[in-house]
């Protein structure tokens, strides 16, 4: 979901071992008997109305599943449960990768039999929770009709947004419209952390952590309210459970499948940042490799800085706008290459600009709590020091 690489699962139809299908067949029996069995005083209209369950899937190994997934399970009397999901995309779509780079992604709604869909996630070893939703009978029919109307060739595609139109936010909005008392007014008054704080770092996703830390602009670090933050699967699940009783549209969640516990590795989570930082640190400190260490780091900085500027100015990735990391990864860094040659007087203004930019980044980073890239800032300071020293020695 939701972030620059917040894609969800592709449309995948596999078969899995029979014991899993049996397990989820039993789970659906529990759903229909425990949560959908009417009492003697239940009106007939409520007895026949569909029941809805919020389905929350735990994080997966693929980068697009790093924050989990959200779906809606619909159970009608005497029928097999159906799961609706807004998380589908297709790598084979025309212009998929160019749309991804420019921030013009198209996702679509689809449905699957509940047992097969949940079985697929269980086979991946991911946690699965169900939460029965308290939706009035009349609105439950309206919700089902809305889903069926959207689940057509003409209506199923939508403009994907990493935080405001993803698999979780779309279902959050449906729930808000369907429950007796809308949730948005109350949640919008409750403060919360930023999207960046909720998405970084991701366990065992080192390259994703590095990419997001660099690409996140100022909008990612702005503080958000609880409504805006309920766009991540586990966050939505927990938010609904923590609402005041009068507003709460769910019963407590039931974990119907416990996935394989993930082993969190420091190197899998932070390895790219640590490895790159250590490599260039050693290269700059060792006299024999210093020239090339500084030169390659300046090239890396320049290329990265221009990519960040491009994401801000030339794409629809609003989350990359006003990126403070341009103060860290200098687009002008190649201008400092001459400082290793015979142009010492030329260097002063560029070195002072680079030092000031790094200082401003440090002030911003400590204020925002955005310290993941601090090792790169230390490399910048070391580089400026070495170039100043080289200039004064010549």
Image: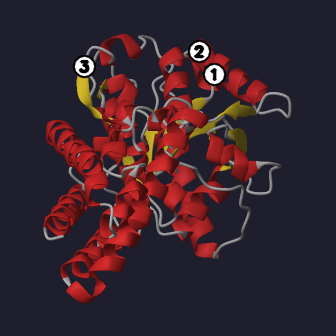
Local packing at callout 3 (Cα closer than 10 Å; few below 14, some 14-19, many 20+) is few
Q: Residue at x 20, y 42 (%)?
A: 356
Q: Residue furthest right?
A: 153
Q: Residue at x 68, y 56 (%)?
A: 10
Depth check, front residue: 85 or 42: 85
Q: How is the image coloured?
A: secondary structure
Comparing labels 2 and 3, the label whose residue is closer to the camera: 3
Secondary structure of the residue carrying numbered label 2: helix
* Image coords of residue 189 (percent x, y): 27, 14
Ranked by sequence position, the earlier of labels 2 and 3 is: 2
Depth check, front residue: 161 or 273: 273
Depth check, front residue: 112 or 86: 86
Secondary structure of the residue carrying numbered label 3: loop
Report the quarter where the C terminus lies.
bottom left
Residue 171: which quarter of the image? top right
Q: Is residue 205 visible?
A: no
Secondary structure of the residue carrying numbered label 1: helix
Q: Which residue has dot 3 on it?
A: 190
Q: Which residue has dot 1 on it?
A: 143
Residue 22: which quarter of the image? bottom right
Ranked by sequence position, the earlier of labels 1 and 3 is: 1
User: Does the residue at mark 1 contact the one at mark 2 (Cβ under 8 Å)?
Assistant: yes
- Specify the label residue 139 is tagged with: 2
Local packing at callout 2 (Cα closer than 10 Å; few below 14, some 14-19, many 20+) is some
Q: Is residue 134 visible?
A: yes
Query: Is 206 situated left or right of 351 in this image?
Result: right
**Image: 82 above or below 45:** below
* Image coords of residue 49 (percent x, y): 63, 23
Q: Residue at x 35, y 33 (%)?
A: 218
């Amino acid at each position: 979901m939701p972030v620059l690489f917040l894609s969800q699962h592709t449309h995948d139809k596999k078969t899995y071992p029979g014991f899993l299908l049996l397990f989820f067949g039993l789970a659906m029996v529990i759903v229909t008997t425990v949560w959908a069995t009417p009492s003697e005083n239940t009106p007939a209209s409520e007895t026949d109305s569909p029941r809805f369950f919020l389905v929350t899937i735990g994080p997966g190994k693929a980068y697009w599943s790093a924050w989990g997934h959200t779906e809606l399970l619909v159970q009608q009397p005497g029928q097999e449960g159906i799961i609706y999901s807004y998380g589908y995309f297709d790598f084979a779509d025309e212009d998929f990768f160019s749309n991804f780079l420019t921030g013009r992604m198209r996702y679509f709604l689809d449905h699957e039999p509940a047992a097969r869909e949940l079985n697929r996630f269980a086979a991946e070893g991911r946690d699965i929770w169900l939460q029965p939703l308290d939706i009035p009978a009349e609105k439950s029919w309206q919700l089902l009709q809305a889903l069926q109307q959207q689940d057509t060739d003409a209506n199923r595609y939508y403009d994907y947004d990493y935080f405001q139109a993803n698999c979780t936010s779309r279902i959050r909005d449906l729930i808000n419209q369907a429950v007796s008392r809308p949730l948005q007014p109350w949640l919008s008054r409750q403060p919360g952390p930023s999207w960046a704080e909720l998405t970084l770092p991701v366990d065992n996703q080192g390259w994703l952590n590095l990419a997001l830390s660099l690409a996140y602009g100022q909008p990612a670090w702005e503080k958000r309210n609880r409504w805006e933050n309920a766009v991540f699967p586990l966050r939505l699940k927990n938010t609904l459970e923590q609402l005041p009783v009068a507003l709460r549209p769910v019963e407590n969640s039931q974990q119907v499948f416990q996935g394989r516990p993930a082993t969190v590795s420091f190197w899998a989570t932070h390895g790219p940042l640590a490895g790159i930082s250590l490599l260039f640190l050693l290269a700059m400190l060792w006299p024999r490799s210093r020239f090339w260490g500084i030169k390659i780091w300046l090239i890396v900085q320049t290329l990265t800085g221009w990519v960040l500027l491009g994401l801000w100015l030339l794409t629809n990735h609003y989350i990359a706008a006003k990126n403070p990391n341009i103060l860290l990864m200098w687009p002008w860094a190649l201008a400092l290459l001459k400082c290793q040659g015979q142009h010492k007087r030329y260097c002063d203004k560029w070195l002072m600009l680079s030092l000031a930019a790094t200082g401003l980044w440090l002030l911003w980073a400590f204020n925002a709590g955005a310290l993941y890239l601090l090792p790169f800032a230390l490399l910048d300071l070391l580089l400026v020091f070495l170039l100043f020293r080289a200039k004064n020695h010549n």
